Image: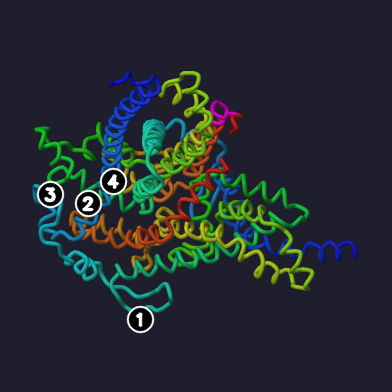
């Protein structure tokens, strides 16, 4: 008893400080995660639930729509991650010769589109993509290119979504790459110059390897963001035309809140989690280095 | 009598002509690079520019070719139409159903309240927990912190359905609490504040305790002032996230009086105004102007926050 009193007396303030956060954590993250695992093995309605074993997972993997959604999500994530890494690296490298003021002006400009919501930016893209009086078709029309149905053509809609994502250079990548390039010691380049290295050799021999930690971080967060793409799909195409732009999260949303099949939606979400975890693991395995400078 | 230039003079002249040539080349490349950067920035910023231009272009001119890249007759009619046509509703967020106003304004108030209240609570709780994990030794601290780190990996879609079922069971669908509560359980801020507070010297804290200050007093008078920059970064990113959040409010809110701006915009787009681009863009402008002002006011913190976030990777 005395030990308990002493323990309480010594640690009560520590527990007081973490109590609000931990309470929220257990209530709104810990418990729901466990519940999601349970739900994935049940048939669930708002009123009742019953165990169905692996049925939800069997349904998920045997569904053509889920396989399509996986394919669309992979295509989207692959092109977006590749384009974002390359464009932010290129912009950050091109920014280097300029003074601090110019650099921070450009960093701000590239980050600005990301302070507004994806819903807002997507609404503008809907207007830009509008077939009859949208900006893009007008622009292409000046070069004699006939009217394109960006979001209505089933073969094109997914590529239009990708285009709308990659045309905006990612601000985070520009900021992080330009900070990393700026912190590479100048002596490394001077030493390379003494040994007669040219600009291309310095770029591939020094800059790119030393940026590996930043590249890894950006690749992981961009891949996660790519796999979770939802808002722009929801508002720009709603997964259509004929499900040709349905992504995994769009499908989870439809399964849960339009079909009210909560069990299957949970199974889909767990599959998404597994895919994201696997990709993050692979990226860490292949890209992590012990380069320090 | 003319003398041959000395070797030294020859060398100097050679270097001079070479460096003059180099300057020219550097200058040329600098201009080319600058042009590329400006092009890339122009493309990236075009949607935002087009948003604001369309918002002040008369609706009839938004469905005509060629598009007015610079508005010929700037007008505020879109925004006044939007406020008039988006319907009216009661200020239910504050329980004032008799206070009636345009839905567009309601959405603005709802979003502002949600973002401000959530951010405030968030920062206080995160600072408390961050301080405990950084400076205090207590049984279970490693376990708790490890659980928080693990939670960072779990995508929000996993908890979406269980949270919706919980909110339904608690009868919080269509309420402010239902939108706000689950969002408060975000752990990245705890991590950020723990990292920051760890680097602070412990002497001041000790001194306050020696002076007989209570633990709470030590926290508010020593830790909070010193942790203020990290709290500001946490607050800014939390505010941005709450202001722009979409999926969870979309799922929880069904009554248009309670919508946030993002949900309201998607609702407008799916309504009869879906092809009135002037109207839509004026709503989108209204939803983004506060964030843009916010960004310019706190740009330094935004940039710092990005880098702090990257350190953990």
Q: Is the magenta stretch mostly helix, strand or loop?
A: helix
Residue A263: give its label: none
Question: In the figure, is residue B155 to the left or right of A15?
Answer: left
- Would you name the residue on which mark 3 appears? B67
In the rendered image, the residue lying farthest to the bottom is: B98
Q: How far apart are marks 4 and 1 (CA)?
A: 36 Å
- Would you name the residue on which mark 4 appears? A236
Q: Distance between the residues labelled 4 and 3?
A: 21 Å
- Numbered disc in front, either 4 or 1: 4
Indicate the chain on which mark 2 is placed: B
Of callouts 1 and 3, the N-terminal one = 3
**In the image, is residue B283 above or below residue A175?**
below
The image position of residue A44, as x and y in percent, is 51, 49
Are labels 2 and 1 on one chain? yes
- Would you name the residue on which mark 1 appears? B98
- Would you name the residue on which mark 2 appears? B50
Q: How far apart are marks 2 and 1 (CA)?
A: 38 Å
Are labels 1 and 3 on one chain? yes
Question: In the figure, is residue B202 to the left or right of B31?
Answer: right
Q: Which residue is drawn at 75% across and 52% down?
A: B140
């Amino acid at each position: 008893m005395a030990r308990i009193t002493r323990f309480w007396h010594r640690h009560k303030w520590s527990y007081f400080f973490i109590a609000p956060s931990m309470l929220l954590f257990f209530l709104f993250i810990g418990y729901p995660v466990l519940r999601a695992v349970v739900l994935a093995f049940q048939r669930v309605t708002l009123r009742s639930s019953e165990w169905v074993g692996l049925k939800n997972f069997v349904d998920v993997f045997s569904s053509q729509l889920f396989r399509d959604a996986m394919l669309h999500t992979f295509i989207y994530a692959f092109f977006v991650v590749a384009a974002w890494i390359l464009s932010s690296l290129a912009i950050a490298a091109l920014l280097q010769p300029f003074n601090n003021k110019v650099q921070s002006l450009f960093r701000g400009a590239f980050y600005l589109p990301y302070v507004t919501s994806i819903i807002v930016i997507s609404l503008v893209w809907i207007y830009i993509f509008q077939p009859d009086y949208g900006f893009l078709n007008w622009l292409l029309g000046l070069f004699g290119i006939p009217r394109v149905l960006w979001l209505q053509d089933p073969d094109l809609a997914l590529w239009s979504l990708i285009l709308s994502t990659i045309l905006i250079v990612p601000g985070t990548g520009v900021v992080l790459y330009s900070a990393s390039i700026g912190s590479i010691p100048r002596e490394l380049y001077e030493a390379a110059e003494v040994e007669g290295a040219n600009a291309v050799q310095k770029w591939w021999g020094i800059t790119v390897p030393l940026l590996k930690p930043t590249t890894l971080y950006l690749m992981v967060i961009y891949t996660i963001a790519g796999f979770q793409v939802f808002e722009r799909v929801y508002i720009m195409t709603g997964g259509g035309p004929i499900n040709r732009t349905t992504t995994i999260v769009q499908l989870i949303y439809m399964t849960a809140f339009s079909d009210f099949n909560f069990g299957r939606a949970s199974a889909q979400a767990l599959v998404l989690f597994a895919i994201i975890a696997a990709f993050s693991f692979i990226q860490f395995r292949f890209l992590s280095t012990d380069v320090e400078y | 009598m003319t003398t041959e230039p000395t070797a030294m003079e020859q060398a100097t002249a050679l270097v001079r002509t070479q460096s003059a040539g180099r300057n020219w080349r550097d200058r040329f490349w600098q201009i080319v690079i600058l042009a590329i950067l400006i092009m890339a920035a122009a493309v990236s910023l075009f949607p935002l520019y087009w948003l604001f231009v369309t918002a002040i272009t008369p609706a009839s001119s938004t469905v005509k070719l060629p598009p007015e890249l610079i508005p010929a007759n700037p007008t505020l009619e879109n925004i006044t139409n939007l406020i008039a046509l988006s319907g009216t509703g009661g200020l239910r967020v504050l329980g004032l159903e008799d206070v009636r106003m345009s839905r567009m304004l309601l959405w603005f108030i709802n979003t502002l309240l949600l973002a401000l209240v959530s951010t405030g609570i968030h920062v206080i709780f995160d600072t408390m927990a961050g301080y405990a994990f950084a400076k205090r030794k207590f049984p279970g601290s490693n376990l708790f912190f490890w659980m928080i780190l693990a939670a960072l990996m779990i995508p929000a879609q996993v908890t979406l359905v269980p949270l919706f079922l919980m909110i339904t069971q608690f009868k919080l669908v269509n309420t402010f609490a239902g939108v706000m509560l689950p969002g408060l359980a975000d752990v990245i801020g705890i991590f950020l504040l723990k990292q920051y507070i760890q680097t602070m010297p412990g002497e001041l804290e000790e001194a306050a305790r020696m002076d007989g200050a209570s633990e709470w007093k030590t926290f508010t008078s020593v830790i909070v002032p010193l942790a203020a920059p990290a709290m500001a970064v946490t607050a800014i990113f939390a505010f941005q996230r709450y202001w722009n959040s979409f999926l969870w409010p979309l799922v929880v809110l069904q009554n248009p009086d309670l919508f946030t701006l993002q949900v309201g915009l998607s609702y407008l787009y799916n309504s009869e105004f879906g092809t009135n681009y002037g109207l839509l863009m004026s709503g989108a402008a209204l939803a983004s102007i506060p964030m843009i002002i916010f960004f310019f006011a706190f740009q330094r913190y935004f940039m710092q926050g990005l880098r702090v976030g990257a350190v953990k990777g």
